[in-house]
Amino acid sequence: MNEQKIRNIAIIAHVDHGKTTLVDGLLRQSGTFRTNELVAERVMDSMDLERERGITIMAKNTSVKYQGFKINIVDTPGHADFGGEVERTLKMVDGCMLLVDAAEGPLPQTRFVLKKALEEGLKVIVCINKIDRHDARVDEVVNEVFDLFIDLDAEDWQADFPIVYAVAREGWAVLDLKDREAPNKSLEPLFQKILEVIPPPKGKVDETLQILVTNVGYNNFVGRLAIGRVTQGVIKVGDTVSICKADRINKIRVTALYTYEGLKQAEVPKVEAGDICIIAGEQNIEIGDTIGEAENPKPLPRVVVEEPTVSMLFSVNNGPFAGKEGDQVTSRKILERLDKELLYNVSIRVEKTDAADSFKVYGRGELQLAILIETMRREGFELLVSKPRVVTKEINGERHEPMEHVVFDLPDQFVGVVTEKMGLRKGVMTNMTNKGSGRVRIEFTVPSRGLIGYRSEFLTDTKGLGLMNTIFAGFEPWKGDIISRVNGALIADRPGETVGYALFHLEPRGRLFVGPGLGCYEGMIVGEHAKDNDLIVNVCREKKLTNMRASGSDEAIKLTPPINMTLERSMEWINDDELIEITPNSIRLRKRFLDPHLRKRAEKLD
């Protein structure tokens, strides 16, 4: 297809502002699906975890045909922890659509993705979504978006952005709010605005071939796939091309070429400048490589993403229950899986440690690492993971730590408790907005380590009515000690099966994480102690039978439901001397040293 008939656009926004729902509408109204075809909601969220959590984790490509034009669309993640996906996918497009919720307005990730788009010199269409919300404040949000453009030093031509108003869930958009009551509304104005505002690709067919690999995939028939935009030139099946890696150049023969047609990949004989293509032929290709001419290739700048801010230790499960549920249990299997993740995820880093069975994994945030762990356990892995720790830097001989910009949106009666908790975590208030609607927006700058373990506490403090959003805000000098968890742990003293009688009598000691009839072992954490010290308990104790009465008589045992320690909650709760045991069916908490004598010895050494 002629490059003048191609448009490459990314849809960017804060989490839950409606990107994937809008892509659904574009696909449906462009005729991508048959009239009677059964199509799932949020069709672009193809991963199980994406559907369960309602968020986009991996950036994905699709394309639609409209009035003789081909529009390549990239759906990007909205959560800050997956910012690496956004940074590399913006290399594939010539413009983007910024979605903003008509009630919430610009949030931290809105600032992050817009900053990256402006740095790439992209033309931006602003789409105010969810204008049908009862609390929508469209005019205010438009002004806030304009202020954000100015704050990010946008060029004059970028700050003069076109605006579209939409309700993606119902599949319609208008250019003027006066038209919102018109019958037979559709996404036609949005399609027209894309064709009008987003420029065609700049590259020419007769120039030297250049393709920057921004994603990789796999096909059972042709093997490893490289995904990227043909910046200039033409690539054909059977061509010999160069792969410009960071340290060397390989030559390969192109065995297959594909382009996107809707949600499918269509095999084609050649792809010309401006289009997004999928190339087969090289099994060791990586994100950031450049595909160029066989002779005298011209490599493009490699994809650079911001550095990780959080690290965790992944190690082999060496507990008593090791190997009972999973089949991927060895250090070799874990390392292979982490190496595979590096090929797809540019913002993950892996380092080997002094221990042969332990690996240090770096990521952009707790959620990114939690998604990786959850994916691995679903693939049959068993492993132990440590508490997340922030990555510090030495700058001018001084220790610096990562900071987060936090935005709270909460009912005004909870302002006091949140401000107090942020103060304990070395947070500094930078802004406070009260519109008189009963809800307040407060902004803080706080050390990243101060937020580890706070999200669930925040939801409890605000009775589930508060919203919390964070984004990385750079490095600042070390802020000093921050108080972590104040409660100790209830630790099982023997292997066996938990008994209701024992748990009933332990309830006054603290909050339990286990119910009756579950397997346990020495050193396993079964609850949170009400005091600040650890307490070793017997959760397997049964009521003894005497010659006076039966063992099951006298007391009607009624247990309080145990706390469900999910993966994220466990990551927030544990201390440095504790680990999370991850298996396909279970998440258990345990001490690093199961033997109490070894724990005492380790405490003395500390």
Image (cartoon, grey):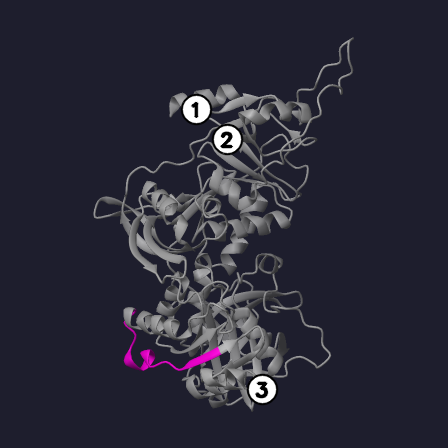
Q: CA distance from mark 2 to mark 3?
A: 64 Å
Q: Which mark is residue 592?
A: 2
Amino acid, disc 3: Pro
Q: Earlier in the sequence, mark 1 or mark 2?
A: 2
Q: CA distance from mark 3 to mark 1?
A: 72 Å
Can residue 259 be seen in the rendering of this structure?
A: no
Note whether 137 is above or below 514 in the view shown: below
Question: Dividing the picture into quarters, in which one does residue 60 lie?
Answer: bottom right
SS type, badge 2: loop
Amino acid, disc 1: Ala
Amino acid, disc 2: Arg
- Whether residue 26 sits left or right of residue 103 in the image: it is right
Q: Which residue is mark 1?
A: 602
Can residue 583 be seen in the rendering of this structure?
A: yes
- Tell me if residue 203 is in the magenta stretch: no
Q: Are marks 2 and 3 in contact (CB under 8 Å)?
A: no
Within 10 Å of disc 3 (Cα), the crowding (few <14, some 14-19, many 20+) is few
**Residue name at image x 21 percent, y 44 percent:** 397
Within 10 Å of disc 1 (Cα), the crowding (few <14, some 14-19, many 20+) is few
Q: CA distance from mark 1 to mark 2?
A: 10 Å
- Tell me if residue 164 is in the magenta stretch: yes
Q: Position of residue 248 (x, y in %)?
A: 42, 64
**Residue name at image x 31 percent, y 37 percent:** 481
Within 10 Å of disc 2 (Cα), the crowding (few <14, some 14-19, many 20+) is some
Camera-side mark, 2 or 3: 3
SS type, badge 1: helix
- Whether residue 445 sits left or right of residue 113 in the image: it is left
Q: Are marks 1 and 2 in contact (CB under 8 Å)?
A: yes
Q: Which residue is mark 3?
A: 183
Q: Position of residue 550 (x, y in %)?
A: 78, 16
Q: Which residues are magenta?
A: 152-165
